[in-house]
Amino acid sequence: MVLGHYGLALGAKRLTPRSSLGFLVLAAQLADLFWPIMLLSGVESVEIVRGRPALLRLDFVRYPITHSLLVEVVSGLLFGALYLLFSKDRRGALVCALLVPSHWLLDVIVHVPDLPLWPGGPKFGLGAWHSPALTLALEAVLFVGGVVVYSRSTRAKNKVGQFSLWGFVVVLVAGYLSARLGPPPQDPGSLARFTLCLWIFVPWAFWIDRHRANARHGPTAIT
């Protein structure tokens, strides 16, 4: 799951209008943002299996920290606590805290059984990746739904607010399709370095929200 995580973050803006989209994207994608760092440090590992279908060519050998449910729940609690400490926004803190482990819950739908409940624990995955059509449908429903909710919950204050959002959408979709339709990565290191590019979407999301206002509640309060 890739686009679905961003869709959930975009849709969550409706639940917490005071929270910047940047925080919501950071929370929803925390696992994938730190995963390449763990790969490069050797703490976690992945293998590239050539000859498999595109959605199944990554064999996630070990990622007990970034992609175990227990660690994501704890990370969500810490994220929410820090957000509450600095923002005093209880609703935003709760939504951010829930978005972090939502990553595991969405991933478990598409992954084969490789997602641990806790480091070293049993692994789960419903395997939607075996069906490219089903996977694409799930991604599309979540992402398009999130974009629609966000665009209706906010309004552009200027042209930057309009074009930054749709640029965000286009780049995400283009990147997703190129990763799925293009050749496999040369090696895990190349994959990790490429995945580090996901960090750019966090400041981009902050930038979008600075140029948009909540449709009913005025300008975003926390940026």
Image (cartoon, rainbow, N blue to C red):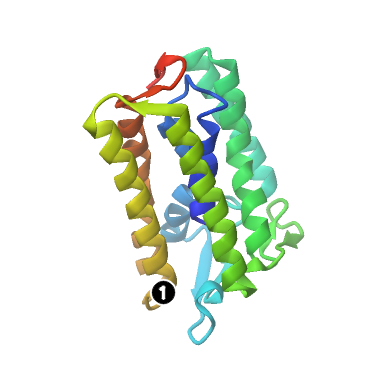
Up-down relation of residue 151 to residue 41 (above or below): above
Per the image, the residue denoted by label 1 is 181
Residue drawn at x 40%, y 66% is: 177
In which quadrant of the rendered image does the N terminus lie? bottom right
Q: How many callouts does the rendering have?
A: 1
Up-down relation of residue 32 to residue 154 (above or below): below
Residue 83 placement, left or right of 213: right
Query: Given the current orientation, which residue lies at the most extreme top position?
Result: 88
Residue drawn at x 56%, y 75% is: 56
Residue 169 placement, left or right of 50: left
Residue 23 placement, left or right of 80: left
* Image location of residue 74, percent across then percent down: 65, 36
**Quadrant assignment, res 206:** top left
* Image location of residue 191, percent across then percent down: 39, 66
Say which of 141 and 40 sits in front: 141
Say which of 126 and 189 sits in front: 126
In which quadrant of the rendered image does the C terminus lie? top left
Residue drawn at x 55%, y 42% is: 8
Up-down relation of residue 27 to residue 55 (above or below): above
SS category of the residue bearing label 1: helix
* Image location of residue 105, percent across then percent down: 67, 49
* Image location of residue 116, percent across then percent down: 69, 57
Residue 68 seen from this side: no
Is disc 1 surrounded by few (<14), some (14 to 19) or many (20+) residues within 10 Å? few
Residue drawn at x 60%, y 31% is: 97
Task: Specify the amino acid type for callout 1.
Answer: Leu
